[in-house]
Amino acid sequence: MKATSFETGFPTAGPAWLFAPADRPERFDKAHAAADVVILDLEDGCQEEHRTAARENIVRADLPMDSTVIRINSTGSEHSAADLAAIKQTSFRTIMLPKTESPADIDAVVEEIADAVVIALIETPRGVLAAESIALHPKVVGLFWGAEDLTAGLGGRESRNESGDYRAPAQFARMSVLFAAGAAGIGCLDSINADISDLELVEREAREVAAAGFAGKCCIHPRQVAAIRKAFAPTEEELSWARGVVSAAKENSGAFSYQGSMIDAPLVHQARRMLALESRDNPDRR
């Protein structure tokens, strides 16, 4: 297993990751002011006729390295070589690679930029089935799954049902990618929700994936950021439990009883992790 995502270069500024079109540089600073991590998008979010200008925008961008990710076009596409050539001229080294289907796709990136790390976007049937081997690549620091391209690749019509929840194929992909990331010891990101009007759905969805073990959720509009942050933040009740468990663990070397429940090492680790997230998101409480 790799080191945890906190040690590998996976951005850990917070759970809300916001896409920003690379051909709209006037949005870069606003995106960073709103979100925890910003993904400058050279792929789907960039208009075809603006790709050259978008790469120039990235070269000129003065943004924090530790909370900026560049999504390039997929390896083998007509645009990927130019995308990587532009990134070489910058200090940005965290690259999101769409339609990753094998470790060879990662190799193609690091052959061009040796010190790059990759967040692999799993959004095809082949990619889902290869998620484990992709996650174990030494240059992969995180996985992110995408529902819409995956559904199209399966011949499906919709990734979600009438209630807005994911259908079974998308749920299978979501959990497959999470398990692959967990087994490799790297971060995992949940897919975007394109409905920017239903913030309750975004929050509910984010709460579910936070409880399952995802490190964050991507979004396409700044108004979704607060819902994601709220969902990922531990409640006061959870924090009180975590503080009590950690305190009791200092006096017990093995399993122990706390508030009527048996607590062992995995639950102590969970409590410490919860407090670490609170410290990260609220530094004034450290």
Image: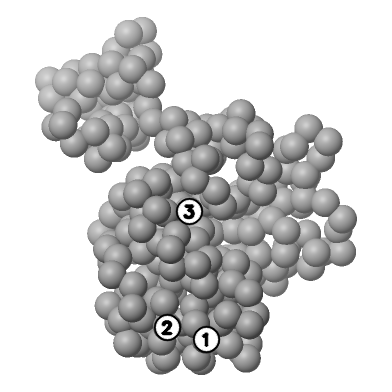
**Where, by quadrant of the figure, is residue 130 drawn?**
bottom right
x and y percent of residue 139 in the render?
38, 75
Residue 141 visible in the picture? no
Quarter holding the C terminus?
top left
Q: What is the spatial separation of the Cα atoms under label 1 and label 2, in whole angstroms?
A: 6 Å
The circle on residue 52 is: 1
> For numbered disc 2, what is the local secondary structure?
helix
Does residue 251 lie above or below 126 as drawn?
A: above
> For numbered disc 1, what is the local secondary structure?
helix
Q: Nearer the viewer, residue 241 or 25?
A: 25
Tag 1 near tag 2, CB within 8 Å: yes
Residue that numbered label 2 is attached to = 56
Residue that numbered label 3 is attached to = 18
Residue 175 visible in the picture? yes
Rate crowding at label 3 as few (under 14), some (14 to 19) or many (20 or more) other CA atoms within 10 Å. many
x and y percent of residue 87 in the render?
38, 83
